[in-house]
Image (cartoon, grey):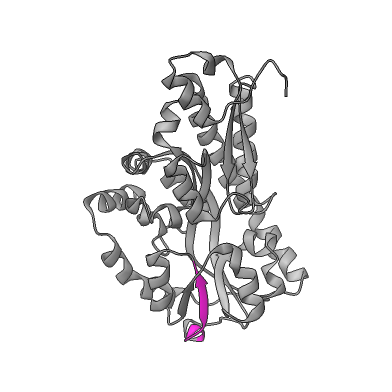
């Protein structure tokens, strides 16, 4: 790093604003961003694209230092850290962010979007300002919304029908609707942190988990759960977000560049996810994974009561209608 330019963290930018200086606009800005996916995963590739676009749009004045694979916290810790201001930026599943921004739970409704293209169209439509406003009210600024893929089931034995899930211990995210969905499917849902999953599958603490094709491959879960059932129970969104007050403390041109880079990287990333799906399934078959395509109709039918139960507020219902257009 050049000695003439001292890198600023977002907390330093806030301090500069308090002191009434204008130094921040002339100095480099480095945002520390955490996520729990491995380097080179579909989510990490989106973050790298975001960093490159931000650097391009600011002429190198602003950049993002990416900490993958839970290096600076699991998803729950990242959500809390951003709110407290101890983490500059994070990318987590909508499921974990919606534990705090509860109106965003709508995005995790089972079988809400039939394809990633459908999800992408919904995210860029009338729902977008509603999502941003809901996050802002809770103290967050959404920078962009990525896809974490369509999620299926990885298990120690094949899931050919919904009845095969009966009493199986299935790891879910630490989110009430995910837990209730798998209870509805007949499983014994077991919430736990993502970082604990490989060991839990290997030791038999859980019999399986739900997850996207990309993560199943990248995290090598096929080594400990070699059956993959293409249920597509949820089309997962992952948001990049900052503390709202700390975002507002950035120079205005950097705010603009960051939001533009977030939107552009999100469009690129969601397209990238679609391109990766079929090659990954072919690769998994070559690795000896048994891929099953069960009838998803019973899963859809079992999911319907969750809509009435979890659409609780006027904002949630408005967001649901906007996403369904």
Left or right: 140, with 230 as reference point: left
**Would residue 291 be visible to someone looking at this image?**
no
Q: Residue furthest front?
A: 19
Left or right: 4, with 325 as reference point: right
**Would residue 68 be visible to someone looking at this image?**
yes
Q: Is residue 19 above or below residue 94?
A: above
Residue 215 in the image, given as x and y percentages of width and height = 63, 60
Q: Is residue 214 above or below residue 245?
A: below
Q: Quadrant of residue 155?
A: bottom right
Residue 237 in the image, given as x and y percentages of width and height = 48, 52
Q: Quadrant of residue 249?
A: top left
- Name which residue lies at 46% across and 59% down: 114
**Does residue 223 belong to the magenta stretch?**
no
Residue 199 in the image, given as x and y percentages of width and height = 65, 72
**Does residue 166 belong to the magenta stretch?**
yes
Residue 1 in the image, given as x and y percentages of width and height = 72, 24
- Name which residue lies at 63% across and 47% down: 44
Left or right: 248, with 217 as reference point: left
Q: Tell me the magenta residue range.
A: 164-172
């Amino acid at each position: 790093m050049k000695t003439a330019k001292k890198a600023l963290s977002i907390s330093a930018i806030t301090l500069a604003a308090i002191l009434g200086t204008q130094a921040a606009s002339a100095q480099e800005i480095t945002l520390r961003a955490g996520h729990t996916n491995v380097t080179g995963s579909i989510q990490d590739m989106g973050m790298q694209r975001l960093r490159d676009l931000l650097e391009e749009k600011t002429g190198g004045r602003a950049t993002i230092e990416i900490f993958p694979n839970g290096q600076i916290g699991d998803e729950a810790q990242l959500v809390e850290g951003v709110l407290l201001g101890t983490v500059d930026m994070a990318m987590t599943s909508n499921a974990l962010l919606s534990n705090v921004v509860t109106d965003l739970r709508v995005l995790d409704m089972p079988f809400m979007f039939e394809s990633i293209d459908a999800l992408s169209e919904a995210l860029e439509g009338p729902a977008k300002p509603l999502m941003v406003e809901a996050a802002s009210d809770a103290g967050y600024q959404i920078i962009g919304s990525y896809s974490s893929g369509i999620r299926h089931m990885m298990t120690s034995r094949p899931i050919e029908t919904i009845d095969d899930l009966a009493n199986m211990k299935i790891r879910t995210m630490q989110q009430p609707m995910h837990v209730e969905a798998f209870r509805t499917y007949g499983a014994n849902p077991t919430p736990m942190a993502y970082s604990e999953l490989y060991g839990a599958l290997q030791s038999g603490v859980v019999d399986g988990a739900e997850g996207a094709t990309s993560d199943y491959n990248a995290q090598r879960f096929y080594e400990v759960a070699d059956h993959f059932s293409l249920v597509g129970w949820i089309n997962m969104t992952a948001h990049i977000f900052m503390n709202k007050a700390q975002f507002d403390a950035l120079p205005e041109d950097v705010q603009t560049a960051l939001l533009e880079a977030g939107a552009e990287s999100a469009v690129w990333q969601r397209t990238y996810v679609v391109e990766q799906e079929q090659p990954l399934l072919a690769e998994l078959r070559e690795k000896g994974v048994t891929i099953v395509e069960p009838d998803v109709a019973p899963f859809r039918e079992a999911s319907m009561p969750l809509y009435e139960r979890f659409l609780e507020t006027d904002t949630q219902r408005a967001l649901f209608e906007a996403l369904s257009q």
